[in-house]
Amino acid sequence: GVQTCALPIYAGAQLLARGRLHPGERSIRQAMHGLARRRDWSGATEGAVHLARFLLHRGRLAAADEVLQAAGQWTRHARDLAPLQQQVAILKGRVQTEGGRLHDAEAVLESALASTVSAGSHLSLAATLALARCLWWQGRYTDAWQRLALVDSDRAAPAERIRLWIGRSRASIGLGRVTDAVAEAARAREEADAVDEPWARGEARYASALALLAAGDWRQADALLARALTDACAAHDGLLAMCARLLRAETARRQGRQHPAAALVRRLSRVDRTALP
């Protein structure tokens, strides 16, 4: 069962999962700071990890970084919080990656990976995935692939396997191995169909569309993007929905369908940048 101190955090997480974003965020924030005032550093940090993960997923990097700064302070107050410290470090590296601070992110994630491997922690896979993404954004596709190739997929949880295949697919695109990219994305889709969660199907279909676009199969890519958009909306994932719409504009442009592409770009250009997910 859920510990009493974690109930408000769990309730907030459930609200987020149902798409009630503002009440969910507020519930976790209140619980997190309440636990910190009671010097329950472990509970407060768990709340911070939940909240930072949500904020990162929404693209609110400054807010996520602020929460992780507080979490870093809380973990220093208590002993035996190594797993939580590792989660905070991995999230910090991910925030830095998405914010373009790639060298800082790489240093943080290398340290987190070494820590998780040394401890024999299951978090080593999360650290590896985050580091590979950081390397990919640096254009170091071979390094990213090599990191991911070392992972034993049979020992990963289904959600992690989906992200592993997606990461391998994107690294393969960077390396120009388009056939491999399509095959790896297809494995992610198979895994996502087994998981049967909208977020999983959406991410896997988006990755598959990206690989197919690289292979020149624009029509199949567009069909998958339409389904990924439906999944993203069902999962309340505004960032994935926007990415799917942008990639659909690109597929339309490559098929010579200038009007739908231009209309979609005009629609997106009207979005308030300060309110982006």
Image (cartoon, rainbow, N blue to C red):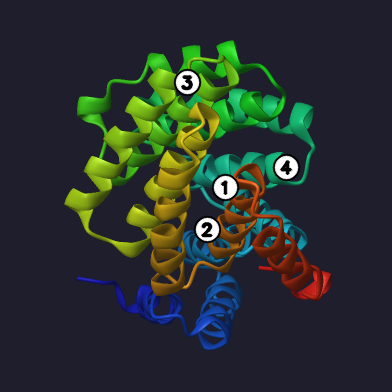
Q: Which of 27 and 164 is in front in this view?
A: 164
Identified by mark 2, the residue type is Val
Identified by mark 4, the residue type is Gln
Q: Distance between the residues labelled 1 and 4?
A: 12 Å
On the question of residue 112 being in view, the answer is no
For disc 2, the neighbor class at 10 Å (few under 14, some 14 to 19, many from 20) is many
Q: Name the residue under label 4.
A: 96
Identified by mark 1, the residue type is Val
At horizontal 26% and vertical 72% (from top left) the residue drawn is: 2
Relative to 37, does residue 88 appear above or below in the rendering?
A: above
Please tell me which of labels 1 and 4 falls first in the chain: 1
Q: Distance between the residues labelled 3 and 1?
A: 35 Å
Q: In which quarter of the image is the C terminus?
A: bottom right
Marks 4 and 2 close (CB-CB < 8 Å): no
Relative to 24, does residue 67 appear above or below in the rendering?
A: above
Please tell me which of labels 1 and 2 falls first in the chain: 2
Q: Name the residue under label 3.
A: 178
Q: Distance between the residues labelled 1 and 2?
A: 6 Å
- Quarter-wise, where is residue 264 in the image? bottom right
Q: Is mark 2 on a helix, strand or loop?
A: helix
Q: Residue 19 at what x, y percent from top left?
A: 45, 80
Q: Mark 1 points at which residue?
A: 88
Q: In which quarter of the image is the N terminus?
A: bottom left
Q: How far apart are marks 3 and 4 (CA)?
A: 29 Å
Relative to 259, does residue 87 appear above or below in the rendering?
A: above
On the question of residue 270 being in view, the answer is yes
Please tell me which of labels 3 and 1 falls first in the chain: 1
Q: Name the residue under label 2.
A: 49
Q: Distance between the residues labelled 3 and 2?
A: 36 Å
Of labels 3 and 2, the one closer to you: 3
Of labels 3 and 1, the one closer to you: 3
Q: Residue 128 at what x, y percent from top left?
A: 48, 27
